């Protein structure tokens, strides 16, 4: 699996794990599938087998291993437009089913600090929702026992909600659909009751495993200020800790004697990461914030400190340029901001303490 895909998925996992814990949902009675529902999964397996063994399918699935998340999303979104799946979905829509969505997805397992799984999928309306637009989604779960960087296989699901309503938290447990099927099946539910059943082709049946928590994101254009911030960093040669930030003198923004501080950091000119990811830290004159943010880098780290102003552009109150040659292994070094306020009326001053933890580890 492409390392970039792991990082992109891990950012969603980090967002999911930062959420407040949802109340445990009572496990509904084990579902009994109608013959039509069971037949949907059997025919989905047949359709996937035919596609994956076709010249087109073999070529496209070989390319999946090297896709990043946007490319994988585009590939999955194209599946319902392939003739074999057009036929399958048209047949499903002709059935008498209690479900509102049929989903096709690709499930992956990966390990990046923690083990997790992700299903990148496309939901189409069936039943009463068959006239509604499709929705792209990503479902993630944390599991320390998962394999590192593997594509598990295709997932097909039948769900109670319309495509655009599939987002949110849910719980799942493996179930056995009967002797006539050989694929892994999951039963998913939340505090409102049953949400759906999904099968994963290529995964073995593990009936009775513990309940796993999941979260489904409805994917779309997040705009210039996305709700999902980058968190997970790629491993590089060196590793440091931004130990603490000290407010020697705050910015006078007319909103009191403290700044609502957050910062961004950028290693070697790559991705810009915010910290705290979704919040800020209030600082008065003389106060220190033990931020303790770790950073992987090769040669340099740029840190920009902001004072958050509601309704206005945030003010830069400090800028730090950290170069590897300025650091000594396992020693703390204090950096002064390179942003100079000495010629202005606002004598803003911040300092940052940095410690190099590991060097030449890649």
Image (cartoon, rainbow, N blue to C red):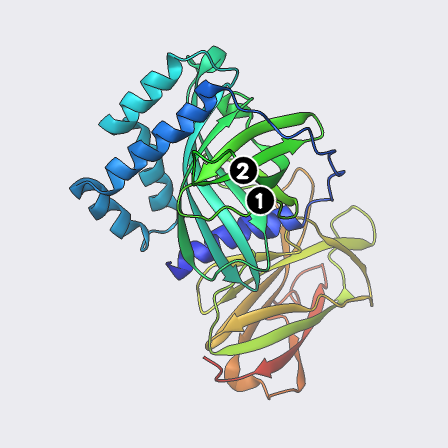
- Asked whether the beta carbons under mark 1 and mark 2 sit within 8 Å of each other, the answer is yes
Asked if residue 32 is positioned above or below residue 62 in the image, the reply reads above
Report the front residue among 160 and 249: 160
Asked whether residue 225 is in view, the answer is no
Q: Residue at x 23, y 26 (%)?
A: 83
Residue 196: % across, % down: 55, 28
Count of marks placed on residues: 2
| Residue 176 image label | 2
Asked if residue 166 is positioned above or below residue 362 in the image, the reply reads above
Report the front residue among 263 and 16: 16
Residue 212: % across, % down: 63, 45
Asked if residue 196 is positioned above or below residue 249 in the image, the reply reads above
Report the front residue among 357 and 32: 32
Q: Which residue occupies the extreme left position in the image? A: 55
Mark 2 secondary-structure assignment: loop
Quick one: quadrant of the N terminus?
Answer: bottom left
- Label located before the other in sequence (1 or 2): 2
Mark 1 to mark 2 CA distance (whole Å): 6 Å
Mark 1 secondary-structure assignment: loop
Instruction: Bin the neighbour count of mark 1 within 10 Å (Cα to Cα): few under 14, some 14-19, many 20 and up.
Output: some
**Which residue in the structure is indicated by mark 1?**
207
Q: Residue at x 60, y 42 (%)?
A: 214
Residue 249: % across, % down: 77, 65
């Amino acid at each position: 699996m492409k390392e970039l895909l792991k990082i992109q998925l891990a950012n969603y996992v980090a967002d999911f794990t930062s959420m407040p814990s949802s109340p445990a949902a009572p496990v509904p009675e084990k579902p009994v599938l109608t013959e039509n529902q069971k037949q949907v999964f059997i025919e989905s397996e047949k359709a996937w087998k035919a596609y994956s063994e076709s010249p087109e399918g073999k070529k496209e699935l070989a390319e999946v291993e090297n896709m990043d998340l946007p490319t994988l999303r585009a590939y999955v979104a194209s599946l319902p437009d392939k003739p074999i799946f057009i036929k399958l979905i048209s047949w499903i829509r002709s059935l008498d089913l209690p479900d509102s969505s049929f989903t096709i997805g690709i499930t992956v397992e990966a390990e990046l600090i923690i083990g997790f799984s992700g299903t990148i999928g496309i939901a189409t309306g069936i039943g009463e929702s068959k006239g509604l637009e499709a929705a792209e989604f990503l479902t993630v779960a944390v599991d320390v026992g998962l394999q590192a960087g593997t594509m598990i296989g295709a997932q097909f699901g039948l769900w109670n909600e319309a495509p655009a309503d599939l987002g949110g938290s849910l719980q799942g447990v493996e179930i056995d659909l009967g002797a006539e099927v050989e694929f892994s099946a999951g039963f998913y539910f939340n505090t409102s009751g049953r949400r759906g059943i999904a099968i994963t082709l290529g995964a073995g049946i593990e009936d009775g495993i513990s309940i796993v928590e999941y979260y489904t994101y409805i994917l779309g254009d997040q705009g210039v200020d996305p709700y999902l911030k980058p968190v997970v960093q790629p491993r590089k040669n060196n590793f440091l800790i931004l130990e603490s930030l000290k407010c020697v003198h705050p910015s006078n923004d007319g909103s009191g004697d403290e700044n609502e501080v957050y910062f961004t950091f950028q290693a070697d000119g790559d991705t810009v990461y915010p910290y705290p990811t979704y919040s800020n830290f209030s600082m008065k004159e003389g106060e220190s914030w033990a931020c303790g943010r770790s950073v992987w880098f090769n040669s340099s780290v740029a840190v920009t400190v902001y004072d958050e102003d509601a309704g206005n552009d945030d003010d830069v109150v400090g800028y730090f340029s950290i170069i590897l040659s300025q650091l000594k292994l396992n020693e703390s070094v204090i950096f002064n901001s390179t942003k100079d306020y000495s010629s202005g009326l606002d004598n803003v001053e911040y300092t940052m303490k940095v410690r190099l933890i590991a060097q030449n580890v890649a």
